[in-house]
Amino acid sequence: MSAKPLAMRDAFLERVWGGMGEDESIFFTCADFGSPVLDKIREHYPDRFVNVGIAEQNLINVSAGLAIEGYKVFAYAIAPFITMRCYEQIRVSLALLSVVRPMNVNLVGVGAGYSYVVSGPTHQCYEDLTIMRALPNFSIYSPADHITAAALFDECLGRNGPKYLRLDAQVLPALYGDRTPDVRRGFEGHRGGGEICLLATGFMVHTALQVAERLAKAGITVGVVDLFDITGFDEAALLTALRPYRGIVTMEEGFRGRGGLDAMMFNLAANREGLAPILNIGVEGAYSFELGTRAELHEQVGIGTNAVFNSVSRFLDRVSNKIHKTGQGS
Amino acid sequence: MESPNLTEKARWVWRETLRVNRRAPETRVASSLSPVEIFVALYYGGVVRFDAKDPRAEWRDRCIISKGHGSICMYPILADLGFFPMAELERVCEAGSFLGGIPDPVIPGYETVNGSLGHGLGVGSGVALALKRKKSECSVFVVAGDGELHEGANWEAIMFASHHRLDNLNLIVDDNRISMLGRTENIVSHGSLAARLAAFGWHCDEVDGHDVEAVRAALLRLKSLADGKPKALIARTVKGRGVPTLENADLCHVMTVKPEIIDSLLGPLP
């Protein structure tokens, strides 16, 4: 996969299209939502493509029916609609039914966080990590670039079970390309060293890298980890990676304190000795109908580069003071 | 193969369903008595092809029981047909049993998760589409209640099935006209359900849902139709059929039947 920036959906769908040529058991369903690459799928594999219309409940149920008959299904729609519009169907026909009936269904949602910038809160998606994490047998993937998104296709195809991919709607810079992200491990470290580590997912990995860059200019080193497999990451490996730090910052483009990445980190840290204090960065406050660029919207809700830089700086002070007070500082 | 006397079989299933309910009063009895003849016709009338020893055999017809809670009458049927031992009927709702108050696909013979209403027809449409694509001759049957058709997801599936010409899909509506809080016509009326389904591009027949031979004949006719239209059979039934305290009582869905009443209905053991 080229490191030239590309929309995640196009990178992922290109792999699906390629896969459909080799594997006749792949079926593609969508709820009246497209992409340039999708046109190839529609044209080349009309027998294994179905658009159910603007009907996400039926999208899930039809996908479940196809899947229990042996098809590996990729269901495609806008992120808030393929998760929240049809959550009961997801719970009953995918999460529950897959306990008894083997199935491979992959929900591909486009529009993570604020990526539909001007569309407002109906089309933005800040709750999906929370509600999908509530389903104990669902896999959740949240890639930060198109290289990772494309690489996750192999995981989706090769592993049974219900899964959810949250893809950004915008073209984001490639983080990988010269190397392939380790999809089995579920995370990649981008910077190491320093006293704190920024553990980010999706778009926020880019914000984390920008904040790390600014801190580096001030002579402060921080670690950055891209966690793209929210449910199946290698726990031991992540704990090993985080243990040297004196502070951990979770960063998500979703509501803070509502059960998303922040809760995942708390759950990971609970009952484990030696993990550092945790700061959560996420969308603050309630819904907003404000218009602005994605960067402006992010600043308003506390997840923009400036906001994160300030929060992280304060957290660094706190962590450092604690270190000095307890005499653990170097 | 000579089909068994379906009327006698339906009578036996009705009795066994009451017996199950006597032991496990948590089961929904009224909505499980209205579809007795539907399930007897499907399973004893040569309509649904199945293999009790291999419930997921590829050649089977897929029978999706969407009104899950209202299908306790399937417990004696599946046991009688050999899907599981008859002794299991003694343990309904007990710890360790797979026969719960609402049937789940851990029960041999159940295809999908049911009882949470309005899912069977959508999943059944996906199964029907898959069978078409696999060039399979198998049919899909979905049994739903008329109250359940208030769930909008059904109508998404109804539109989908006719558009995709799923003529291997058969919907049977247990049209007992009563949901939990009363008569569906007073809650949100379906008007003429047959006319509505026809307007959506479906074949639609109606039948007396307690005339088991008529139900069987209607189902066999429906199954044989393959002209591009999905098919529905509206079976006019009585909720709580055969139990005077339940029959036509608006709130019969949530009513229990006293053990002594069941005993008097069943009469002395033969």
Image: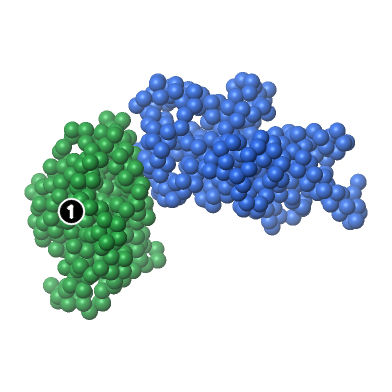
Chain colours: A blue, B green
Q: Residue at x 41, y 38 (%)?
A: A54
Report the quarter where the C terminus of chain B lies. Answer: bottom left
Q: Is residue B244 above or below residue B107?
A: below
Q: Position of residue A143 (x, y in %)?
A: 61, 35
Quarter of image, res B166? top left
For label 1, count other residues whose C-alpha is less than 10 Å away and answer few (under 14), some (14-19) or many (20+).
many
Q: Name the image quarter holding residue A62.
A: top left
Q: From where the camera sits, is residue A42 visible?
A: yes
Q: Residue at x 9, y 53 (%)?
A: B213
Question: Residue B71, how many percent across, how many down?
Answer: 27, 58
> Residue drawn at (29%, 72%), measured in percent from left and top?
B256
Residue bearing the label numbered 1: B235
Residue found 75% across the figure and 43% down from its top? A307
Q: How many marks?
A: 1
Query: Is A184 placed left or right of B30 in the picture?
Result: right
Image coordinates for residue B130, horizontal then vertical, percent: 32, 35
Camera-nearest residue between A66 and A310: A310
Residue B10: give x, y in percent of width and height: 15, 60
Q: Is residue A141 visible?
A: no
Q: Is residue B238 left or right of residue A124?
A: left
Element under label 1? Answer: strand
Instruction: Report the residue that reaches farthest toward the bottom.
Output: B260
**Left or right position of B110 against A302:** left
Q: Chain of mark 1?
A: B
Task: Look at label 1 and name its amino acid.
Answer: Ala
